Image: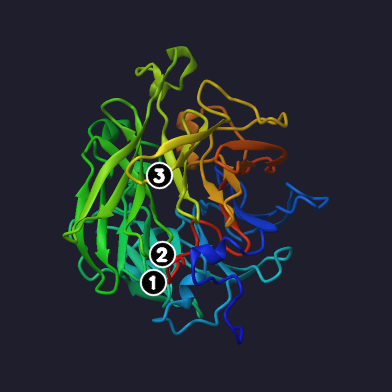
Amino acid sequence: MTIRPDPTFHATAQLAMQAPVENYGFTVMLSPDGAQPDGIAVIDLNPKSDSYGSIVHQLLMPNKGDEFHHFGWNACSSSLSPLSGHAFLERRYLIVPGIRSSRIYVIDTKDPLDLKIHKIIEPEEVFAKTGYSRPHTIHCGPEGIYVSTLGGGGKDGTDGPPGIFIMDCETFEIIGQYEMDRGKQDKHYDFWWNLPQDYMVSSEWGLPPQFENGIVAEDLLSNKYGHSIHFWDLRRRKNIQTIDFGENYQMALEIRPAHDPKKSHGFCGVVVDTTNLQGAIFTWWRGDDGTWQSKKTITIDPRPEKPENLPPLLQGFEAVPPLVTDIDLSLDDKYLYVACWGLGEMHQYDVSDPMNPVLTGKVELGGIARGTKHPGGGDFAFGPQMVEISRDGKRVYWTNSLYSTWDEQFYPGQEGGQMVMAHVGETGGLELEPDFYVDFPKGYRAHQIRLEGGDCSTDSFCYPNV
C-alpha cells in the first residue's frame, strides 16, 4: 500500500490521456490443448528499446488446462471515487481467471520483468462462495474487484444462472454474489459501469454447453445465444431494465460505455445477425424520461466466398461473416475500434456523434480464406481479435485468438499466437507498424492485452472532463 494515490490513477479520462506512455504490455499465453500451462507474457512496448516488440519475460502457471481469456487489475482510477475507502491502493496485481478451470491467479507485477504468483484461488472456493463458475471479466471498482462469470453451479455450469461476484481488493478474498435482483438476466458475458451515474450494463454470450466444446450450430441458427443487454442500479444491485436487440442478433458481447461520466451512452458489439450474417454495433443511451434505449448504428457485411475455401461450418453459406468479437473505445470517446475476426479486418469508426458512426480507417490482417500477412512479412493466424488502445489514443494493439475450440472451427489447421500494433493518424486512420510483430512461442496463442499504467478497457473515471 502506498501513502498517496497511485500516480497511474487519474480523476478524468482527459488527464489519463496525458499520462506517460506504456513501456510494457501483459498478454495472455494460452495453451489450447492444455499440453502446457497457460501464462502471462510481458511485451516490450518501448520503441527505443533493443528488445522492442518482443517477449521479455513470461510467467507460467503451476497448473494446466486453465484456459486464460480475460483478466484485469486489482485497482484503477475508480479508487479515486469519493465513495471509496481505498484511494491508496496500487495498480499492482493482475487478477487472471481460468474460464475452463474456474481457478483464479493473483499476479504481482511490481517488477514487470519478474512477475510472481501472489495467490491462487482454487475452483472449489469459487463454487462454494459464489455458486458461479467460469470466471471471465475483471473490473476494479471503488470498493472491490468485480468478476463476471459465464457459468452457474453444477458440473456443466447450468445449475442456476451465471452472474457477478466481488473480491476484496486488498486480501483477494471472495466476498460473495453481487446481484440482489437479476430480473431477466440468465446469461452473462461482459459488464461495465458509469460510477457517478450509478448504473451498470451487462451483456450475454451463452451457457457453458454452448461454447466450451465449440459453437453449437443448431443453437446459433435457432437463436439460442444471448441477444440482450441489462441495465442495473449499481448500488442497489438490481436489474432495472433489459433491452432485447432481437433474437437474430446473436451473441451481444463487449460493452463499452463512454469514458466521460457526464455522458450517458455506450456501445455493444454483436457477433452475427443470423438473418444475413452481418456484424453489428448498437449504440445505447438513456432517454430524457430516464429509460434506456438502443439503436443499431453500424452494420458490417459478410464477404462472398467459394465453399471450397471455407471451413465446414460456413460452406453452406458461401460467405465469410465479419464475426465482430471485440470492440474498444478511445479515452476521448472519439474512436471505436471493431475487430472483425472472420473477415480479418480491424475497423476504426469516428463516434463523436454516437448515433452516426463514420468509418475512418481499416486494416486487413489474417482472415478466413484470405490469410493476409503482416507488412513485416510474418503470418497472422486467425484474424484481429482482442484489441487494446493506448491511453493517448495513438497506438492500437491486438492479438488473434478467440477461444480455443472456436479457433479450430473457424480456422481449422491454423496455429499460432501473434500481437501487432497500428498507429493512429492525426485525423484518424490506421497503419500497421512493420517493426512491431510479436510471435508467441510454439504451442501458445494470444488473447487479452493489458497495458502498464492502464488502458482504455481497464479504467473507469469518477470525474467529468473539463
Residue 430 against residue 65 in the figure, above or below: above
Labels 2 & 3 near each other (Cβ < 8 A): no
Measure the C-alpha gap from mark 3 to mark 1.
Answer: 24 Å
Viewer can see residue 154:
no
Residue 272, position as x, y percentages in the image: 34, 34
Q: Amino acid at mark 1?
A: Ile
Quick one: SS at disc 3?
loop
Residue behind mark 1: 166
Residue 324, position as x, y percentages in the image: 41, 37
Q: Amino acid at mark 3?
A: Glu
Image quarter of residue 82: bottom left
Which mark is on residue 147? 2
Residue 308 against residue 24 in the figure, above or below: above
Residue 9, position as x, y percentages in the image: 55, 72
Labels 2 & 1 near each other (Cβ < 8 A): yes
Q: Nearer the viewer, mark 2 or mark 3?
A: 2
Residue 103 against residue 215 in the figure, above or below: below
Residue found 64% across the figure and 55% down from its top: 25
Measure the C-alpha gap from mark 2 to mark 1.
Answer: 6 Å
Q: How many marks?
A: 3
Residue found 32% across the figure and 39% down from its top: 297
Of labels 2 and 1, earlier in sequence is 2
Question: On the picture, is 319 further left or further right than 169?
Answer: left
Residue 78, position as x, y percentages in the image: 46, 72
Q: Nearer the viewer, mark 3 or mark 1?
A: 1
Residue behind mark 3: 212
Residue 200 against residue 360 in the figure, above or below: below
